[in-house]
Image (cartoon, grey):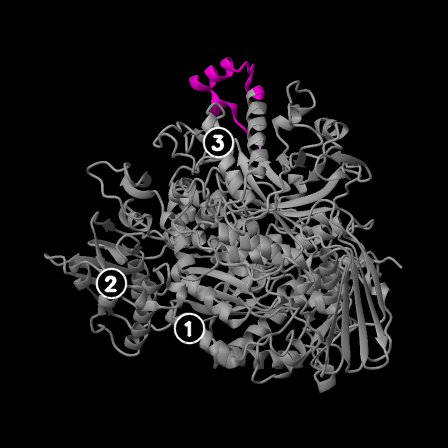
């Protein structure tokens, strides 16, 4: 029997073995390998068995290849237990047999802590929520042109100039502890240092520091529409060799506290207008760079070299991460750069077996440029903004347009990889991980222009749970399958009970009475004429 | 390969266990604390602010200021940099703020003996206490619960630590309840002594409510100063102020999902910070009946979601008082004859017959506008007696000058498919066509109002009804008297708003709650049906909430002169934003209400002629104030925009 739980269909997996009695629970756990880092090839499968041994013993067996599989199994086990208000005890089931493994290795959420600062405690709460849903990748968009809250040991100037306030800073210790907190909950934290665009505040200290010069252009420049995608502007100076040196230092600081195998380099929304100045032009001429796209590739390759070097730089602090001497696999956003990858002559290191592409602008089924990237062998993470951007639907923060609309949980749940042009069966080679699925999975993002720690939970949950089932289970059925909403509501209640500030999905009456809140297809002939009224107002 | 076995003895029945096995994973250990000498010391900010051309401008601390400028923290800068300072909502009269400020400690704030009679005097005492709590909440470390001890008076400069603030409050009239038309005006004056050792504050108003608003305004002339560890106050100011509209409300629905009473208090707190004065409490609906009825205990037994999800009589009385002190009326709505159901099931088994019909009828779209269905049985005489008892219970708890009777979305097919009702109609020589049901509804409304009046000892009181089939152009003048009924408009202001000039022309007093943009629950996934978003999507930003003007909506139909005339004649009482709670509980209500409720507040208090963009900087700053006072408002912009006023333009 191979059935999956929340995610999916657990009702069919058990039978009621009569009344259960007070008894002893014996949990045995068997782990086969001692992996202690989550990677793209970690085995997260587990087997869960519950059997009765006489009347007073319940044997729970959890078997998994890795700690991470076992952890998922415990999560599942917790979903087989409820509090019974009538007799004031917990209850569970037997017999149970569950074999489970995820459909995708990359099941992620992204949080942005640069547009607005998110306190560590709220990031922990987000990690809790992810662990309840067997999500395993937290992509941390740590910095942006707005602020630079990551404390760099090598360059403390970054936060001095770039943090919103002295209270809105992440120290290396806090980050290290958070990475640990996530790990024991089955989650890897992937840091992003977005560059060369989305960098500004924090980078102003160059000119007044001997020998560093201009590290960034257009910082806080007006009118912003000319130089960047949203205020405040800012873009690194690709012609200043010191920029790469500073980047290398920050990379090294980050790799001392984060896992060393995956690193997000950002790379989106570069505005060439910001680079149009004499020093850059001169530099391009001297280096035989014909156009800004060449310059963009130049920047990317040099930044990547620094990332590689940072990975091999010895650790400073005694409990820093042990560096592995192998370059991290960089992830970059889709952008004009990735659009051009397949036709660029001088791509250098931007090779399919090195880079992972996070696709936010579109899906391959509609977008030939993305199909080309897939054909070239780039692994991809689906993050299409029209489905997976959780900040959408909350009005606008510049101007007063409605902005993009809210994506319902059903929209996330019903994302069909195959129909969107993602061949989930194809496998590709990666220099670090060997053979991996080309479609690694998906990631829903929470940008924080209009979000803070008070409002993040309601935007993440329960939609993140619906998304998690798409990625863990990749079910054939859609959100409208009869038990799905009820299961999601149950999961939502569970998360609320565990302290997550989830969004309420329905009046409580819907949970108490079940399917009454569905629009039923059945037609019962009314005995008299039907009058239609106004649309509902509440 | 590893194997762990845990044995856990269990005493309770069934199965209980705890997982203790963190040793399953090697790398799990208590994170060691490593100190990084130098980090904490080097964590500081490079920036500060100066006031330039009425804009607080972020500058480099070391070499950003001109010789003539004094860098100050952002909150202090905001106090009086712009001519309207950090005031929200904007006063409608004179605003004169001196450019100079003085530092002081909250320990040195004193109230002079109140100039008022009892019971106003004791109300003022409470208002003064609330005001003092605002001062403590300004300290960034207030969440530690240290209160006054956050302010280290010993560390202040000699001048700062000896400076006194002396506040005098005077109230002329004896009003103790917020009513429609209550005088809420006030005059506020701040004058420093010649040696700047004392600031005398005086707030004078006709009513307690005016003085309370004045204290609210005074708190906005004060900020925490992170450079000195003191509070800072505008040293001299004169403000005269009164609201543009008398009804300024927020509706909260506690029937679709239950909201704990402590969160309703937080809602009232938020209303008071924004000089809103009505909490419209949609307390019951078909889904649940959380209102504890003294005379009819069966209502909650059948109707509450659980025994914990009930508002007790004591809690509700306490809430009314809590609101009154904060200048907020708690206005109850008992919605009928539709939007009832759970709580009314007990009739048949107690000899009362069917009090409600169509309860939980399915498929629901045939019998109601949203599940579950339910509607009162208008031909059951006993139902009216029950209604009368309920009204008595309501008026024992709430103030008795204004009552919301609901009256929306009656679904005729519910009555039309109930044999008891159709038989009665036919037996009485009436038909079962639409107009027959409208008439039946009107008769219900008349009898229900009769019961309400009886419950009020035979005294007339104003009743509010929603726009509906009964309150439309065809029926309103025929069935509803404009001297009794106030109509709350929820129709779309521009697309289906023809009812608005009609009501005004016929002398009805109106409250605007037009769904575009004053329904705060819009813009999320639908809760019935498919993947589409809810019916009133999209989400409306604060900008649209701010822009929505009742007078302009009316003027769109009647022209400006006539709209202005209707306003002056008192036919536009004000407005209200609604938060229906199908998809809201206490976790998410505050971020849906705030800060958009503040945008609503400025529209209704100030009725500004300027646009949202002019107000943006003040709004973003006011939002921070709401956070300081413990509310959980939604975020509007990256913090960078708060630091850099006017630079996040579209």
Marks 3 and 2: CB-CB under 8 Å? Answer: no
The residue positioned farthest toward the left in the image shown: B194
Instruction: State the image coordinates of residue B190 (x, y, percent, origin top left).
Output: 20, 58
- Looking at the rendered image, the quarter that the N terminus of chain A falls into is bottom right
Q: Secondary structure at mark 3?
A: helix
Q: Earlier in the sequence, mark 1 or mark 2?
A: 2
Magenta-colored span:
A268-294
Q: How many marks?
A: 3
Confirm whether circles 3 and 2 share one chain: no
Residue that carries the numbered disc 2 in the rendered image: B105
In the depicted view, which residue is nearer to us: B135 or B124? B135
Q: Residue at x 86, y 80 (%)?
A: A54
In the depicted view, which residue is nearer to us: B93 or B214? B214
Q: Is residue B80 left or right of residue A408?
A: left
Whether residue B134 is visible to the viewer of this picture, yes or no, is: yes
Residue that carries the numbered disc 3 in the rendered image: A245
Residue B297 sits in quarter: bottom right
Tell me how far mark 3 sits from mark 2, CA to CA. 48 Å
Callout 2 crowding tier (Cα within 10 Å): few <14, some 14–19, many ≥20: many
Q: Is residue A50 left or right of residue B352?
A: right
In the depicted view, which residue is nearer to us: B527 or B568? B527
Q: Nearer the viewer, mark 3 or mark 2?
A: 3
Residue B425 sits in quarter: bottom right
Tell me how far mark 1 sits from mark 2, CA to CA. 28 Å
Residue B207 sits in quarter: bottom left
Residue that carries the numbered disc 1 in the rendered image: B322
Instruction: State the image coordinates of residue A385 (x, y, percent, origin top left).
Output: 64, 39
Q: Secondary structure at mark 2?
A: loop
Tell me how far mark 3 sits from mark 1, CA to CA. 61 Å
């Amino acid at each position: 029997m191979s059935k999956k739980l929340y995610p999916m269909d657990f009702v069919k997996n058990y039978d009621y073995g009569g009344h259960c009695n007070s008894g002893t629970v014996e949990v045995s756990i068997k782990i086969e390998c001692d992996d202690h880092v989550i990677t793209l090839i970690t085995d997260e499968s587990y087997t869960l068995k519950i059997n009765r041994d006489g009347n007073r013993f319940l044997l729970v067996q959890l078997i998994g290849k890795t700690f991470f599989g076992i952890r998922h199994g415990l999560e599942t086990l917790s979903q087989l237990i409820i509090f019974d208000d009538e007799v004031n005890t917990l209850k569970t089931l037997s017999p149970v047999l569950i074999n489970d493994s995820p459909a995708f290795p990359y099941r992620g959420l992204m949080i942005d802590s640069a547009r607005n600062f998110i306190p560590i405690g709220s990031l922990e709460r987000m990690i809790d929520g992810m662990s309840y849903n067997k999500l395993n990748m937290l992509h941390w968009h740590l910095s942006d042109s707005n602020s630079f809250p990551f404390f760099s040991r090598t360059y403390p100037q970054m936060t001095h100039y770039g943090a919103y306030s002295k209270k809105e800073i992440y120290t290396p210790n806090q980050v290290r502890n958070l990475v640990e907190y996530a790990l024991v909950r089955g989650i890897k934290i992937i840091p992003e240092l977005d560059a060369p665009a989305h960098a500004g505040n924090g980078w102003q200290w160059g000119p007044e520091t001997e020998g560093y010069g201009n590290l960034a252009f257009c910082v806080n420049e007006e009118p912003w529409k000319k130089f960047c995608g949203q205020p405040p502007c800012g873009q690194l100076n690709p012609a200043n060799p010191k920029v790469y040196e500073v980047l290398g230092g920050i990379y090294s600081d980050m790799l001392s506290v984060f896992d060393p195998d995956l690193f997000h380099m950002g790379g989106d929304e570069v505005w060439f207008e910001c680079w149009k100045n004499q020093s850059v032009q001169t530099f391009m001429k001297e280096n035989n760079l014909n156009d800004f796209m060449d310059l963009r590739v130049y920047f990317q390759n040099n930044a990547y070299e620094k990332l590689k070097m940072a990975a091999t730089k010895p650790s400073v602090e005694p409990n820093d991460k042990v560096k592995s001497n192998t370059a991290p696999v960089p992830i970059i956003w889709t952008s004009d750069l990735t659009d051009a990858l397949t036709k660029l002559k001088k791509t250098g290191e931007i090779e399919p077996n090195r880079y992972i592409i996070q696709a936010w602008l579109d899906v391959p089924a509609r977008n030939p440029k993305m199909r080309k990237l897939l054909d070239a062998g780039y692994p991809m993470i689906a993050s299409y903004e029209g489905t997976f951007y959780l900040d959408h639907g909350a009005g606008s923060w510049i101007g007063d347009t409605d902005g993009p609309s809210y994506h319902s949980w059903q929209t996330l749940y019903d994302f069909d990889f195959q129909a969107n042009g993602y061949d989930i069966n194809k496998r590709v080679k990666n220099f670090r991980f060997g053979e991996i699925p080309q479609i690694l999975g998906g990631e829903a993002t929470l940008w924080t222009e209009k979000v803070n720690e008070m409002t993040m939970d309601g935007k993440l949950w329960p939609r993140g749970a619906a998304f998690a089932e798409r990625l863990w289970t990749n079910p054939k059925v859609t959100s409208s399958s009869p038990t799905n909403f009820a299961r999601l509501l149950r999961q939502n209640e569970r998360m609320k009970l565990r302290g997550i500030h989830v969004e309420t999905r329905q009046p409580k009456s819907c949970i108490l009475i079940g399917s009454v809140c569905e629009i039923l297809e059945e037609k019962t002939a009314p005995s008299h004429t039907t009058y239609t009224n106004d649309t509902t107002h509440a | 390969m590893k194997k762990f076995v845990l044995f856990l003895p269990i005493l309770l029945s069934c199965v209980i266990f705890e997982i203790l096995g963190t040793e399953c994973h090697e790398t799990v250990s208590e994170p060691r604390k490593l100190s990084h000498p130098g980090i904490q010391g080097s964590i500081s900010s490079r920036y500060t602010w100066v006031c330039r051309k009425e804009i607080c401008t972020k500058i480099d601390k070391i070499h950003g200021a001109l010789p003539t400028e004094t860098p100050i923290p952002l909150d202090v800068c905001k106090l009086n940099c712009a001519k309207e300072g950090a005031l929200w909502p904007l006063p409608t009269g004179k605003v004169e703020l001196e450019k100079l400020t003085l530092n002081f400690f909250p320990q040195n704030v004193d109230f002079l003996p109140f100039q008022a009679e009892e019971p106003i005097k004791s109300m003022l005492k409470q208002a003064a206490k609330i005001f003092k709590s605002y001062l403590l909440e300004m300290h960034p470390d207030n969440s530690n619960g240290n209160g006054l001890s956050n302010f280290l008076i010993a560390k202040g400069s000699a001048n700062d630590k000896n400076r006194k603030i002396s506040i005098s409050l005077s109230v002329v009239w004896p009003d103790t309840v917020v009513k429609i038309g209550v005088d809420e005006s006030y005059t506020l004056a701040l004058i420093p002594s010649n040696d700047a050792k004392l600031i005398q504050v005086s707030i004078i108003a006709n009513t307690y409510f005016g003085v309370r608003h004045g204290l609210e305004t005074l708190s906005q002339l004060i900020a925490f100063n992170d450079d000195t560890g003191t509070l800072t106050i505008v040293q001299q100011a004169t403000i005269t102020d009164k609201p543009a509209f008398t009804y300024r409300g927020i509706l909260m629905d506690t029937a679709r999902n239950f909201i704990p009473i402590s969160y309703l208090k937080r809602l009232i707190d938020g209303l008071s910070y924004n000089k809103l004065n009505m909490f419209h409490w949609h307390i019951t609906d078909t889904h649940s009946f959380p209102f504890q009825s003294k005379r009819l205990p069966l209502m909650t037994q059948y109707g509450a979601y659980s025994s914990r999800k009930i508002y007790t009589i004591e809690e509700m009385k306490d809430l009314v008082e809590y609101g009154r002190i904060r200048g907020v009326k708690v206005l109850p709505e008992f919605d009928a004859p539709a939007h009832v159901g759970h709580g009314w099931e007990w009739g048949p088994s107690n000899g009362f017959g069917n009090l409600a019909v169509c309860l939980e009828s399915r498929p629901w779209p045939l019998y109601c506008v949203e599940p579950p269905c339910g509607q009162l049985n208008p031909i059951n005489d006993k139902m009216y007696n029950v209604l009368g008892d309920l009204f008595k219970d309501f008026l024992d708890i709430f103030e008795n000058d204004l009552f919301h009777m609901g009256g929306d979305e009656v679904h005729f097919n519910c009555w039309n498919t109930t044999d008891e009702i159709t038989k009665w109609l036919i037996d009485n020589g009436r038909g079962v066509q639409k107009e027959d049901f409208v008439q039946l509804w009107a008769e219900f409304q008349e009898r229900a109002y009769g019961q309400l009046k009886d419950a009020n000892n035979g005294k007339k009181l104003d009743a509010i009804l929603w726009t509906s089939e009964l309150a439309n152009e065809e029926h309103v003048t025929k069935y509803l008297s404009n001297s009794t009924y106030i109509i709350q408009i929820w129709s779309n202001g521009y697309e289906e708003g023809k009812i608005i000039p009609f009501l005004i022309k016929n002398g009805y007093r109106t409250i605007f709650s037009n769904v575009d943009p004053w329904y705060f629950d819009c813009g999320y996934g639908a809760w019935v049906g498919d993947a589409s978003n809810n019916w009133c999507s999209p989400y409306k930003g604060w900008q649209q909430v701010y822009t929505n003007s009742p007078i302009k909506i009316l003027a769109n139909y009647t022209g400006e002169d006539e709209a202005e005339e209707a306003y002056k004649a008192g036919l536009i009482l004000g407005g209200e934003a609604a938060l229906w709670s199908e998809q809201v509980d206490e976790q998410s209500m505050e971020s849906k209400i705030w800060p958009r409720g503040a945008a609503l507040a400025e529209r209704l208090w100030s009725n500004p002629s300027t646009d949202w963009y002019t107000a943006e900087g003040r709004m973003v700053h006011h939002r921070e104030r709401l956070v300081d006072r413990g509310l959980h408002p939604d975020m509007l912009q990256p913090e960078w925009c708060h630091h850099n006023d006017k630079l996040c333009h579209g």
